[in-house]
Image (spheres, helix red, strand yellow):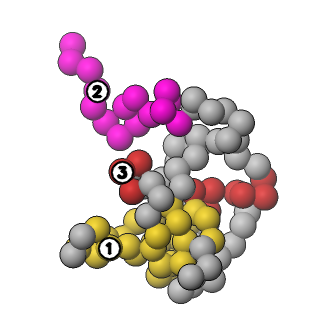
Amino acid sequence: MRRSKGRVSKKTRIMGRKVRRHTVTPAEIVKTFEVGANVQLVPRGNFEDYPHTRYAGRVGKIVDKRGNSYVVELKDGSVVKKFIASPVHLRLIKL
């Protein structure tokens, strides 16, 4: 049987290497952002609602809120992409 090459493949070793750095606190789960705020994508140990790890560290702008998550728009080269990410994986940036 072929091995899975899905989105979470090999991520437990990569994201779980520094366990203390990736722990999720209740304050990070309930934090809120304003629409139009600049945020940095920071994938944490929680695998729910996070964009692909190739976009880790990229800065984007919050466009909309959907439930508990946010829609983040960022440029990948000349293409504008939108991601849905939970607040655990976002960090506020002052530009």
Q: Which mark is residue 75?
A: 1
- Amino acid type at circle 1 is Lys
Q: Which mark is residue 4?
A: 2
- Amino acid type at circle 3 is Arg
Question: Is 10 inside the magenta-drawn segment?
Answer: yes
Q: Quadrant of the C terminus?
A: bottom right
> Whole-percent x and y of residue 55?
39, 57
Q: Which residue is at 72% across, 67% downward?
A: 31
Q: Which residue is at 78% across, 58% downward?
A: 27
Q: Is residue 49 left or right of residue 9?
A: right
Q: Is residue 56 left or right of residue 79?
A: right
Label 1 crowd (10 A; few <14 / some 14-19 / many >=20) = few
Nearer to us of marks 3 and 2 is: 3
Q: Determine the residue located farthest toward the top in the rendered image.
A: 1
Q: Which mark is residue 54?
A: 3
Q: Which residue is at 32% across, 73% downward?
A: 75
Number of numbered discs overlaid on the protein picture:
3
Q: Quadrant of residue 23?
A: top right
Residues in magenta? 1-15
Distance in Å between CA atoms under marks 2 and 1: 29 Å
Query: Do the numbered discs 3 and 2 sit on residues whose CB atoms are within 8 Å?
Result: no
